Image (cartoon, rainbow, N blue to C red):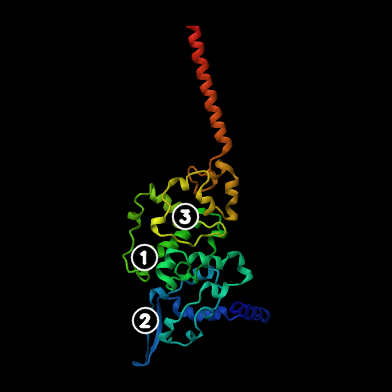
Amino acid sequence: MRTYYRNIVTAFLLFTGFSSTAEDQNQCLKCHGNHIYSIHNEWTERTEKRLMNPYFVIDSVRMSAGVHQSFSCTDCHSTDYGTYPHNGELKLEPMAGCLDCHGGDEKYASYQFEKIEEEFGKSVHAQACGDAFTCSKCHDQHYYQVTARNSESVTGIVRYSNEMCLSCHDNMQKYQLLSEGQKPELVEAHSWLPNKNLHFEHVRCIECHTEVVDSLMISHNIMPKENAVKRCVECHTADSRLKASLYKYQNLQSRSENGMMGNILSNESYVIGAYRNPLLNWGSILIFCVVLLGVSVHIIFRIIKK
């Protein structure tokens, strides 16, 4: 219903040639787009400068590239934020979730938000943190981009995805917002993994830490660390697990259609063992048999001549 009314308002603003979105954003970014803001101190009757909480500073350039760039801040935040100084109780305001806007919206049906929410409900994050773990813990609404569907660079997709995981798992302050434990030592936890740096650069964390669901572009069922994939053959075989996850995107299908050599030359995330070509397999067997036959014939003729 909220989306329905928003579409009506947006259509009206476009029809009349007027939009207050940019103006509303600029009003908020006057403070939240800077590390220093000004406030009038009624006690001293003068304007003072203060440091902005770094977690409340918005990068306006990144925000302008995000999918929500055309929204007013009050589309998600309370309209009471229009009053300054803000009421301290507004910090307790429950934030709008993805389904509050996208749920039941036919325009975004291909993203399967309801299915994602169902799968996420099974994840270790949801089981451990409940309602405290929302979509925004991984997907910052201010900057979110649909990178995996639009990017043709596997490395770019991997980097963008892994930065989401590391924004919490490699950040002590954010990690302790949801956990009583100490920040996990990522290097030690992956000490069993050969060539760790190569894996971190070319494979997403979710490749090994999620249960792959064929009906979803990206799996959101994060498994407990005990259930993480640790068998090399899961990825390093012709029937690679990566084909059902990282390489399932339509804009990357051409990579698998190029054959083994095409993938080696064009794919910066080429995985050894995952691009075996049946023709080359049979060709290598044929060459081996011919060589073996040649050696055998040579030995026979040497024996006869002797």
Judging by the rendered image, the residue that carries numbered circle 3 is: 207
CB within 8 Å, label 3 to label 2? no
- Depth check, front residue: 58 or 218: 218
For the question of whether residue 221 can be seen, the reply is yes
Quadrant location, the N terminus: bottom right
Left or right relative to 113: residue 52:
left
Label 1 to label 3: alpha-carbon separation: 21 Å
Looking at the rendered structure, which numbered label has been put on residue 65? Answer: none
Whichever of callouts 3 and 2 sits on the residue coming sooner in the sequence is 2
Q: Residues within 10 Å of mark 1 (few under 14, many from 20)?
A: few
Q: Nearer the viewer, mark 1 or mark 3?
A: 3
302 shown above or below 165: above
| Amino acid type, callout 1 | Asn
Whichever of callouts 1 and 2 sits on the residue coming sooner in the sequence is 2
Query: Residue lying furthest left in this view?
Result: 182
| Amino acid type, callout 3 | Glu
Please state the horizontal and vertical placement of residue 175, each as a whole percent of the image. Answer: 36, 67
Please state the horizontal and vertical placement of residue 261, each as a whole percent of the image. Answer: 55, 41
Q: Secondary structure at mark 2?
A: strand
Judging by the rendered image, the residue that carries numbered circle 2 is: 50
Whichever of callouts 1 and 3 sits on the residue coming sooner in the sequence is 1
Q: Secondary structure at mark 1?
A: loop
Judging by the rendered image, the residue that carries numbered circle 1 is: 171
| Amino acid type, callout 2 | Arg
Residue drawn at x 44%, y 68% is 126
